[in-house]
Image: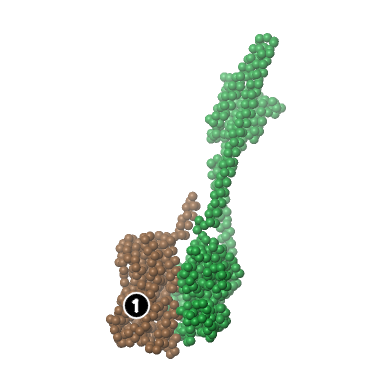
Chain colours: A brown, B green
C-alpha cells in the first residue's frame, strides 16, 4: 500500500506543476522587448515562494502554438497566468475558460475585451503617451512640416489598432503640418517589412520620415535603409525595442520603448494579489520611454537591459 | 491451491514474492548503474541515424550517420540526445553555419529539455555568434544568463567547418573554437551553483547549420588544465560576461554585416506577382518570380504576397528547404485558374523563417483558396502506411477524407500514429492528380505531423478488445464456477462414500452378526440355554452397534470435527473401556484448536480408538497417554501405554493393525507402532497437510 501511495504521489507530481507555480507566456522569448518583462516578473516573485514557468513560441507569428501553450497552463495546475496574446481574438476563448475556472489571469499589452474582474486584470503600455512621444519627436525632426509613412499597422492586435489611432490623434495635435501619405499594414516577418519600407523609399514622391509601429516594422525600415545605394538618410521613429545598434549608428532616430520591466513587476504584483483574492486595478497603463542616442546610457534605459546578467535559476 | 492455504501461509507467500521482486528490482538497478558506469567511462560517438536516441525541438532536422543538419532558421532549435546523461565530460563537434549571422553550438548538462522554446531547458550552451563575432558561453534556465564571451579571431569564418569543444568538470567550464584557417579562441567560466549533470545536444538560431563528428567523452582535471589561466581570469573579472557590446568597431561591424543581409532581401527589379497570371490563360515565357518555398520536393510550391505557384520542374544549385527565398525564372503556364512554372531556374536569395502556416479546416481546403499555401489542419487518422522513406496517412475531418504524404524525420514516431488519433499536420495541399490519384479531394505534402491525442477509448477497436476481455472473463468465471460445483459434488460424494464404508464396516457388519445370532437362536435345537446365549450375543452386538452408530453420528456433526473433540472423545472411549479401573489416563492437545477435514477426524479417531482398545485389553498398562499435536504443517496423534509391550510379529499382523494401516493409507498418513517389551507400546500417526 505504501509503495502504491508513493507511486501515486510521484505520478501526481509528474503531471502537475504544483501549487506554487505561475506561468508567464509572452509572445516570444529571448528578445529585448520580452526579457525585461521576464526580469520584472522574476524579481517581483523572488522570495514569495512562487516558481515562474516562462516560455513562448520561438516565433512571434505562431498564434496556434501560443494558444496550445496557454491551454496547457489550465491542465498543468498553475496558480495563475500572465499572458501576452499574439492576436487579440485567437486566444480569447481560452482566456475566458481559464477565468471561468477561477484561475487568476493578467493580460499584457492587449485589451482582449472581457471585462476585468477578480480573476482578470490588464497591464499594458500607455499607447496615448507613446503616440505623443513619437508625434512630438516627428514634429521636432521635421520642424513641424513634411510627409510621413506609417508602417507596421497591426490589425490582429487591439493594441496595434489603438496605437495607430492614438498616433494619428497625436500627430494632428503636435504636428498638424505633417501629412501622413502612406499607411501600411504590418506583420512579424522582417523581410516583408523591409520590402514594404523599400517601396516607400523608392516611391516617386519620397516621404520625409517613417514611423514604424512595431519592432519588426522598425527593423524592416532599418534594413531597407541599409539596402539603399547610397544609404538612405530618412529618419525612422520606431516602436518596441528590438534593435539598439541603429540608434547609436544614427540609422534609427528613436524608438518608443515599452517599459516591459515595470509591466512585468506590476503584472506579477497583480497576479499575486489575485491569487490571494485581493482586488487589483482592472486596467493599468505603464508610460513608455523614448529611446534616443542622447539618453541611450541613462539609468532608466539601461535598467531595461539588466536581464542579461540575471540568474534565472532562482526564478 | 492457494485457497486451501491458511491465512498465515498466504501472507508468507506474498511476503516472499514481494521480497523476491524487491531483490530483483535492486539487482536490476545495480546492474543498470554498473552498466551506466561502464558506459559513462567510454566515449560516445553520435550516430544520428538512431533517431530514437534524439529528440528534435523546433527546426527542420535531417541526419545521416555521423552528421546532422538543421535547415531551418527557427530561433532556439534543438536536437537533444536522449540516451546519454553525464556529469564531468567533454563534447566535441564540427559545425558549419550557412549564414554569417545567427548562432550555433552545443548544449551540455541539460535537463527538462523536452519542450520547444528558445531557452526552454536547464543547462549550458556554448556557441559562435558571427554577427557579434564572439564565442559565448552561458546558462539557460528558461532564460539566458551569459557567463562568458570572447571575441573571435579576425580571420575566423564560422561559415566554414569549425571545431567546437566544451569541457565541464565540477563547476568549471572551458570552451574552445578552432576555425578552418587554424585560428582558435578559448574561454572559461565557473558557475558556483552549477548544474551537475545532464544531456547533450545541438542548438541553432536564425541560421541553418550542419554538425558532424559529435563525440562525448569523460573528462577530468587534466582536460581542464589548458583552461586554468582563463578560469583564474574569469574569477577575477566578473565583467567578462557583459552582454551588450557597443564599441565603435562593434557597431561598424554590425552595420556592415546587416547591410549584406539587407541587400540580399531586396525585391529584385522586374519581378512579377503570381496572381498576375491566374486570369491570363496560356504560356508566359521569360517570367521572373520571387517568393518563398513553402513546400519542398516532391511538390515544390512558391509563395509570394499574391498567391502560390507550383514549380513543375526546376534547376537549383542547392537543395531546396522550407523558408528559402528564391528568384525563379521560367515559363508560367496558366490554365483553369491554376498555374505552374516550367523549366524554372531557381536562385537562392536567402533563407528565412518559413511562412507562418494558416490554420484551416479540411472543408476550407475544398474550394482551392488555400491550395499550395503553407497550412496546418487537423484530422482524425484513418490509416497510416509506411512507404519508401516516409509514410502515407489517410485522415478524415467531419465528412471529408483526405490524404497526407510525409517523410521520416526526428519529430514523428511512426509507431505512435494509431488509427483514431487526432493529428495536426503542416504542409501544402494540392489537388494534382499525381498526388490525389483522383481518389481524394486534396493531398497534403506534410513536413510536420503532431499527435494531438490518441484514439478515444470507445473506438471500435477498443470496444472489440473490451468485448473480448469481457467474454474471456465470463468464460473464465463460468469455468471456475463449474470447477467449484464439481469440487463440491466430489466432496459430497467422497463423504457419502466415506459414510457408506463406515456403515458397511460397522452397522452392516453388526446387523449381519445380529441376524446371524437371531437366526441361530431360531434354529437352535440344543436347548434353552443355547438359545439364550445366542440372544445375549445378539443383544451385545446391538449395544456395540448402537455405540458405533452414536460415534459415527458424532463425527458427522460439525462440533465434533474439531481437534479438541477428538481428544475428549478418545479420552471418553478409554474411560469407558477401563470401566472404572485404576488406569491413569492423560489426554492433551498441543497447538491451536481447529476444525479438521472429516477423513482426518475419522482416521485419527478410529486409529486412536483401536490403539486405546489394544492397550487396555492386552497391555495391562497403568498409564495411558493420549496426545494430539497440531502444527501448520501436520497433525499427529500419539497413543502411548506403559504396559508389557507387543511381540515383534504381532506388531505387523494381528491386533487390528491391518485396519489401522488401511485407515492411515486412506488419508495418506504415516503410521508407526513401536513397542519395547516390558516398557509399553506407542502408536503414532501423522497426517501432513
Q: Position of residue B294 (x, y in %)?
A: 51, 75
Determine the residue positioned at 66% across, 31% down.
B662
Residue A265 shows up from this direction: no
Front residue of this view, candidates B465 and A281? B465
Q: Nearer the viewer, residue B181 or B322?
A: B322
Q: Residue at coordinates 33% horizontally, 61% vertically from top-left? A: A276
Instruction: Please tell me how crowded label 1 is: few (under 14), some (14-19), or many (20+) other residues with Cα within 10 Å.
Output: many
Q: Nearer the viewer, residue B122 or A120?
A: A120
**Can I make out residue B345 in this image?**
yes
Specify whether B660 is left or right of B363.
right
Q: Residue furthest bottom?
A: A230
- The quadrant of the image that shows the N terminus of chain B is top right
Residue B354 vertical placement versus B665 (above, below): below
The residue positioned 57% from the left and 42% from the top of the image is B481
Above or below A66: residue B685: above
Asked if residue A150 is positioned above or below residue A101 in the image, the reply reads below
Q: Where is the C terminus of chain B found, in terms of image quarters? A: top right
Tag 1 secondary structure: helix
Using the rendered view, name the quadrant where residue A247 is placed: bottom left
Q: Residue furthest left?
A: A173
> Which quadrant of the view contains residue B213?
bottom right
- What residue did someone put label 1 on? A164
Question: Dot 1 falls on which chain?
Answer: A
The quadrant in which residue B210 appears is: bottom right
The foreground one among B304 and A59 is B304
Q: Position of residue B5 (x, y in %)?
A: 57, 41
Question: A290 above or below B193?
Answer: below
Expressed as whole percent of the image width and height from the top left, the position of residue A124 reads 34, 71
Residue B22 at x, y = what percent?
55, 52
| Residue at figure coordinates x 48%, y 80% from the top left | B279
From this viewpoint, which residue is outermost toward the right?
Answer: B649
Amino acid at each position: 500500500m505504501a509503495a502504491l501511495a508513493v507511486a501515486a504521489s510521484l505520478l501526481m507530481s509528474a503531471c502537475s506543476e504544483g501549487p506554487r507555480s505561475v506561468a508567464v507566456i509572452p509572445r516570444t522569448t529571448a528578445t529585448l522587448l520580452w526579457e525585461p518583462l521576464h526580469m520584472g516578473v522574476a524579481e517581483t516573485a523572488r522570495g514569495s515562494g512562487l516558481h515562474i514557468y516562462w516560455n513562448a513560441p520561438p516565433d512571434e507569428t505562431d498564434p496556434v502554438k501560443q494558444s496550445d501553450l496557454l491551454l496547457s497552463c489550465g491542465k498543468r495546475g498553475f496558480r495563475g497566468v500572465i499572458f501576452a496574446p499574439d492576436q487579440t481574438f485567437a486566444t480569447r476563448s481560452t482566456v475566458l475558460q481559464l477565468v471561468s475556472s477561477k484561475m487568476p489571469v493578467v493580460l499584457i499589452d492587449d485589451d482582449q475585451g472581457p471585462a476585468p474582474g477578480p480573476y482578470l486584470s490588464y497591464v499594458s503600455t500607455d499607447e496615448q503617451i507613446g503616440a505623443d512621444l513619437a508625434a512630438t519627436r516627428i514634429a521636432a525632426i521635421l520642424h513641424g512640416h513634411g510627409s510621413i509613412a506609417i508602417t507596421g499597422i497591426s490589425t490582429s492586435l487591439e493594441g496595434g489598432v489603438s496605437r495607430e489611432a492614438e498616433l494619428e490623434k497625436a500627430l494632428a495635435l503636435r504636428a498638424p503640418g505633417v501629412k501622413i501619405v502612406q499607411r501600411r499594414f504590418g506583420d512579424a516577418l522582417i523581410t516583408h517589412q523591409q520590402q514594404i519600407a523599400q517601396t516607400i523609399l523608392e516611391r516617386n514622391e519620397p516621404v520625409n520620415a517613417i514611423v514604424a509601429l512595431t519592432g519588426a516594422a522598425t527593423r524592416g525600415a532599418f534594413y531597407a535603409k541599409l539596402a539603399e545605394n547610397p544609404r538612405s538618410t530618412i529618419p525612422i521613429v520606431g516602436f518596441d525595442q528590438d534593435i539598439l545598434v541603429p540608434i547609436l549608428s544614427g540609422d534609427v532616430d528613436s524608438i518608443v520603448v515599452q517599459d516591459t520591466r515595470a509591466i512585468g513587476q506590476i503584472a506579477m504584483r497583480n497576479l499575486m494579489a489575485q491569487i490571494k483574492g485581493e482586488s487589483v486595478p482592472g486596467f493599468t497603463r505603464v508610460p513608455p520611454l523614448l529611446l534616443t542616442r542622447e539618453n541611450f546610457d541613462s539609468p532608466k534605459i539601461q535598467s531595461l537591459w539588466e536581464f542579461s546578467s540575471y540568474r534565472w535559476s532562482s526564478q | 491451491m492457494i485457497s486451501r492455504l491458511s491465512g498465515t501461509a498466504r501472507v508468507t507467500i506474498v511476503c516472499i514474492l514481494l521480497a523476491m521482486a524487491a531483490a530483483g528490482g535492486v539487482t536490476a538497478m545495480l546492474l543498470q548503474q554498473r552498466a551506466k558506469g561502464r558506459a559513462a567511462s567510454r566515449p560516445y560517438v553520435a550516430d544520428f541515424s538512431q533517431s530514437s536516441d534524439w529528440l528534435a525541438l523546433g527546426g527542420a532536422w535531417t541526419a545521416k550517420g555521423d552528421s546532422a543538419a538543421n535547415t531551418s532558421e527557427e530561433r532556439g532549435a534543438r536536437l537533444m540526445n536522449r540516451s546519454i546523461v553525464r556529469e564531468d565530460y567533454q563534447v566535441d563537434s564540427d559545425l558549419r553555419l550557412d549564414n554569417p549571422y545567427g548562432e550555433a553550438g552545443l548544449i551540455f548538462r541539460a535537463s527538462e529539455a523536452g519542450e520547444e522554446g528558445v531557452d526552454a531547458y536547464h543547462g549550458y550552451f556554448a556557441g559562435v555568434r558571427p554577427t557579434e563575432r564572439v564565442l559565448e558561453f552561458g546558462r539557460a534556465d528558461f532564460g539566458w544568463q551569459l557567463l562568458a564571451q570572447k571575441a573571435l579571431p579576425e580571420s575566423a569564418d564560422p561559415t566554414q567547418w569549425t571545431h567546437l569543444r566544451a569541457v565541464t568538470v565540477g563547476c568549471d567550464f572551458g570552451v574552445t573554437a578552432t576555425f578552418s584557417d587554424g585560428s582558435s579562441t578559448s574561454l572559461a567560466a565557473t558557475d558556483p551553483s552549477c548544474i551537475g549533470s545532464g544531456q547533450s545536444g545541438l542548438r541553432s538560431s536564425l541560421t541553418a547549420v550542419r554538425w558532424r563528428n559529435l563525440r562525448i567523452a569523460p573528462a577530468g582535471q587534466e582536460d581542464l588544465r589548458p583552461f586554468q589561466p582563463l578560469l583564474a581570469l574569469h574569477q577575477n573579472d566578473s565583467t567578462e560576461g557583459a552582454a551588450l557590446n557597443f564599441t565603435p568597431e562593434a557597431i561598424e561591424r554590425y552595420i556592415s554585416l546587416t547591410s549584406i543581409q539587407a541587400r540580399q532581401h531586396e525585391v529584385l527589379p522586374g519581378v512579377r506577382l503570381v496572381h498576375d497570371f491566374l486570369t491570363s490563360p496560356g504560356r508566359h515565357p521569360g517570367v521572373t518570380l520571387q517568393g518563398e518555398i513553402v513546400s519542398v520536393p516532391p511538390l515544390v510550391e512558391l509563395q509570394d504576397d499574391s498567391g502560390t505557384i507550383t514549380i513543375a520542374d526546376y534547376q537549383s544549385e542547392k537543395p531546396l528547404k522550407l523558408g528559402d527565398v528564391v528568384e525563379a525564372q521560367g515559363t508560367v503556364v496558366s490554365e483553369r485558374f491554376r498555374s505552374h512554372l516550367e523549366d524554372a531556374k531557381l536562385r537562392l536569395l536567402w533563407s528565412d523563417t518559413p511562412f507562418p502556416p494558416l490554420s484551416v479546416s479540411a472543408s476550407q481546403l475544398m474550394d482551392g483558396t488555400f491550395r499550395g499555401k503553407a497550412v496546418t489542419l487537423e484530422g482524425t487518422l484513418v490509416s497510416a502506411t509506411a512507404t519508401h522513406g516516409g509514410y502515407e496517412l489517410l485522415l478524415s475531418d467531419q465528412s471529408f477524407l483526405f490524404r497526407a504524404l510525409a517523410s521520416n524525420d526526428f519529430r514523428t514516431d511512426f509507431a505512435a500514429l494509431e488509427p483514431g488519433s487526432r493529428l495536426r499536420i503542416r504542409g501544402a495541399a494540392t489537388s494534382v492528380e499525381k498526388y490525389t490519384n483522383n481518389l481524394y479531394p486534396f493531398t497534403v505534402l506534410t513536413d510536420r505531423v503532431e499527435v494531438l491525442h490518441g484514439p478515444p477509448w470507445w473506438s471500435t477497436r477498443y470496444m472489440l478488445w473490451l468485448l473480448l476481455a469481457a467474454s474471456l472473463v465470463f468464460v473464465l468465471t463460468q469455468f471456475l464456477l463449474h470447477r467449484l460445483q464439481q469440487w463440491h459434488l466430489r466432496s459430497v460424494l467422497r463423504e457419502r462414500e466415506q459414510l457408506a464404508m463406515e456403515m458397511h464396516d460397522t452397522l452392516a457388519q453388526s446387523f449381519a452378526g445380529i441376524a446371524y445370532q437371531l437366526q441361530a437362536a431360531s434354529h437352535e435345537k440344543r436347548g434353552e440355554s443355547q438359545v439364550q446365549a445366542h440372544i445375549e450375543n445378539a443383544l451385545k452386538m446391538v449395544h456395540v452397534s448402537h455405540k458405533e452408530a452414536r460415534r459415527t453420528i458424532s463425527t458427522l456433526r460439525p462440533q465434533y470435527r474439531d481437534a479438541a473433540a477428538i481428544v475428549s472423545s478418545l479420552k471418553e472411549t478409554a474411560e469407558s473401556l477401563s470401566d472404572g479401573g485404576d488406569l491413569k489416563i492423560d489426554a492433551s492437545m498441543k497447538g491451536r484448536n481447529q476444525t479438521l477435514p472429516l477423513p482426518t477426524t475419522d482416521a485419527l479417531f478410529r486409529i486412536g480408538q483401536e490403539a486405546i482398545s489394544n492397550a487396555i485389553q492386552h497391555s495391562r498398562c497403568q498409564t495411558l497417554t493420549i496426545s494430539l499435536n497440531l502444527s501448520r504443517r501436520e497433525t499427529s496423534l500419539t497413543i502411548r501405554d506403559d504396559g508389557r509391550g507387543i511381540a515383534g510379529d504381532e506388531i505387523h499382523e494381528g491386533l487390528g493393525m491391518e485396519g489401522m494401516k488401511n485407515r492411515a493409507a486412506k488419508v495418506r498418513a504415516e503410521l508407526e507402532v513401536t513397542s519395547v517389551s516390558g516398557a509399553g507400546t506407542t502408536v503414532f500417526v501423522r497426517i501432513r497437510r
